[in-house]
Amino acid sequence: MKTIHTILRQDFGVLDPNLIRTQILAAAGVHAVELEPAHNGLAIEYDAEILTPPKLFDLLCLCGVYPAPQGPSSDAPTRDDG
């Protein structure tokens, strides 16, 4: 099992986290969806063998959910303005 932490985006109006939670739980391979204390946060536990990364991404986008923003990692490419 893997867990992804995501945030709901409300670019097109207010979203109902419980409705989205129910929609995500209905997908094959999803085992748990928990509302997180952070504003509009969700933790999704899924089976990566059933729900592949492309399918998971499609599911999240259909539900208005996007991966939580991450800071740049030490090995991430950076822009050099100098």
Image (cartoon, rainbow, N blue to C red):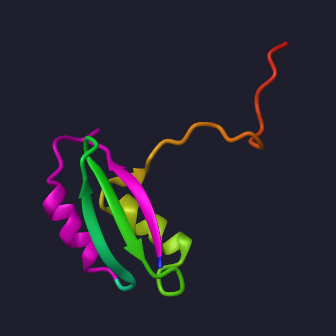
Q: Is residue 33 left or right of residue 50?
A: left
| Residue 28 percent across, percent down from the top left | 36, 85
Which residue of the protein is positioned furthest toward the right in this rendering?
82
Residue at 30%, 61% (x, y): give it: 63
| Residue 20 percent across, percent down from the top left | 21, 62
Q: Is residue 68 left or right of residue 80?
A: left
The boundaries of the magenta stretch are 2-27
Which residue of the protein is positioned furthest toward the top in this rendering?
82
Q: Is residue 16 left or right of residue 32?
A: left
**Magenta stretch contains residue 13:** yes
Residue at 39%, 84% (x, y): give it: 29
Q: Is 50 located above or below residue 80 in the figure?
A: below
Q: Is 18 located above or below residue 68 in the figure?
A: below
Q: Is 44 located above or below residue 71 in the figure?
A: below
| Residue 68 percent across, percent down from the top left | 44, 47
Q: Is residue 49 left or right of residue 5?
A: right
Q: How many marks?
A: 0
Query: Where the C terminus falls, by quadrant?
Result: top right
| 78 vs 43, nearest the viewer | 43
**Magenta stretch contains residue 9:** yes
